[in-house]
Image (cartoon, rainbow, N blue to C red):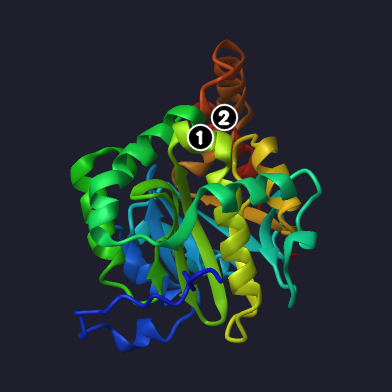
């Protein structure tokens, strides 16, 4: 019998919190982000948070928005953002989606046949339990650096020791935020950051140590977290994130093979009113395409190209 790794609530020492914001969907995740230094804004009937690159993203991830264009532009201007991105079923935009599971039963037969022996191998080699604060502070940074090196990216929140320590402290100050993890003895092999709110479980991040990958720690962690969440009567769904702005076919296949479906929506992108005529132009898009041809592996350029294309396609319902 595996230990329950989703119900480990962290005590919250900060009792004074804005009541109006707290009742909005996405407030638990917003608080976690706020404690990490992210700007949180209430506008257009939703919560928004600032991401690197000075963009605003809406919360919660599963909420489809149809904001008033005037209010949206005002929110962007007032917060000095370059733009905003949100999922919508009514606006035009990039074809995108959310990975989710809504099933009411889940076992090894729910997993793709190619993943089943990997899950079995992981269950034989590892223990699954919540990671403690001390374990994350001591070992988590090594897993972060290993994962980001494999993916060809770097996020200072997960790569800089001081910022990583701040993230861990923020998580353990928020009820609903947990770190399900996989261990080989006392060695941390893989972990997730999850957030539980309003009958949804959000899988926010997943990191692993490269030397443990031959025994499939990520597979056993995904399987265990998904199975426990599906069989939890107090949860309706599990979210495994958005379709990313960069090509990630292997990640898509991985999630689908664990029983997740990609629920389609459009990712709407609105640029700052002053910048829109400059950036959302054939000249700007052409310059980025040329730079991309010279640097095919550059993920920042790929993201910029996708954002500009999204801004070109996005608009409110007519």
Mark 1 nearby-residue class (10 Å; few <14, some 14–19, many ≥20): few
- Pick whichever, 243 or 50, lies toward us: 243
Mark 2 vs mark 1, foreground winner is: 2
Residue found at x 21% / y 85%: 15
Q: Where does label 1 land, which residue?
A: 278
Of callouts 2 and 1, the N-terminal one: 1
Q: Quadrant of residue 42?
A: bottom left
- Where residue 275 appears, as percent x and y from the top left, is 46, 41
Q: Is residue 26 above or below residue 133?
A: below
Task: Check disc 1 and report its element: helix, strand or loop.
Answer: helix
Question: Horizontal placement of 218 versus 163: left or right?
Answer: right
The quadrant in which the N terminus is found is bottom right
Residue found at x 50% / y 51%: 126
Q: Where does label 2 land, which residue?
A: 302
Residue 152 visible, this orientation: no
Question: Horizontal placement of 194 versus 81: left or right?
Answer: right
Q: Is residue 257 above or below residue 249?
A: below
Mark 2 nearby-residue class (10 Å; few <14, some 14–19, many ≥20): some
Residue 224 marker? none
Distance from disc 2 to disc 1, alpha carbons, whole Å, reads: 19 Å
- Pick whichever, 194 or 187, lies toward us: 187
- Where residue 304 appears, as percent x and y from the top left, is 53, 34
Question: Horizontal placement of 226 versus 155: left or right?
Answer: right
């Amino acid at each position: 019998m595996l230990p329950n790794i989703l119900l480990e609530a962290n005590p919250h020492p900060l009792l004074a919190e804005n009541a109006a914001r707290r009742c909005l969907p996405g407030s638990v995740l917003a608080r976690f982000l706020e404690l990490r230094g992210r700007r949180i804004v209430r506008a257009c009937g939703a919560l928004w948070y600032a991401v690197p690159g000075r963009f605003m993203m809406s919360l919660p991830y599963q909420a489809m928005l149809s904001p008033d264009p005037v209010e949206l532009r005002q929110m962007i201007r007032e917060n000095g953002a370059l733009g905003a991105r949100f999922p919508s079923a009514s606006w035009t935009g990039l074809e995108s989606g959310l990975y989710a599971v809504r099933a009411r039963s889940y076992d090894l037969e729910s997993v793709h046949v190619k993943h089943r022996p990997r899950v079995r191998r992981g269950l034989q080699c590892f223990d699954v339990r919540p990671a403690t604060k001390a374990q994350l502070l001591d070992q988590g940074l090594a897993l972060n650096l290993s994962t980001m090196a494999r993916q060809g990216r770097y996020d200072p929140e997960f790569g800089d020791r001081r910022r990583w320590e701040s993230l861990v402290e923020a998580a353990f100050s928020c009820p609903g935020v947990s770190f399900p993890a996989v261990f080989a003895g006392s060695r941390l092999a893989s972990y997730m950051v999850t957030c539980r709110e309003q009958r949804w479980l959000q899988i926010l991040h997943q990191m692993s140590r490269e030397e443990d990958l031959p025994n499939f720690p990520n597979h056993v962690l995904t399987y265990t977290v998904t199975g426990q969440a599906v069989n939890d009567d107090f949860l309706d769904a599990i979210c495994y994130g958005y379709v990313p702005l960069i090509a990630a076919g292997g990640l898509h296949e991985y999630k689908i093979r664990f029983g997740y479906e990609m629920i389609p929506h459009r990712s709407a992108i609105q640029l700052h009113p002053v910048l829109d005529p400059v950036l959302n132009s054939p000249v700007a898009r052409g310059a980025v395409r040329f730079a991309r041809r010279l640097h095919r592996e550059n993920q920042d350029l790929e993201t910029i190209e996708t954002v500009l294309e999204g801004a070109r396609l996005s608009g409110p319902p007519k």
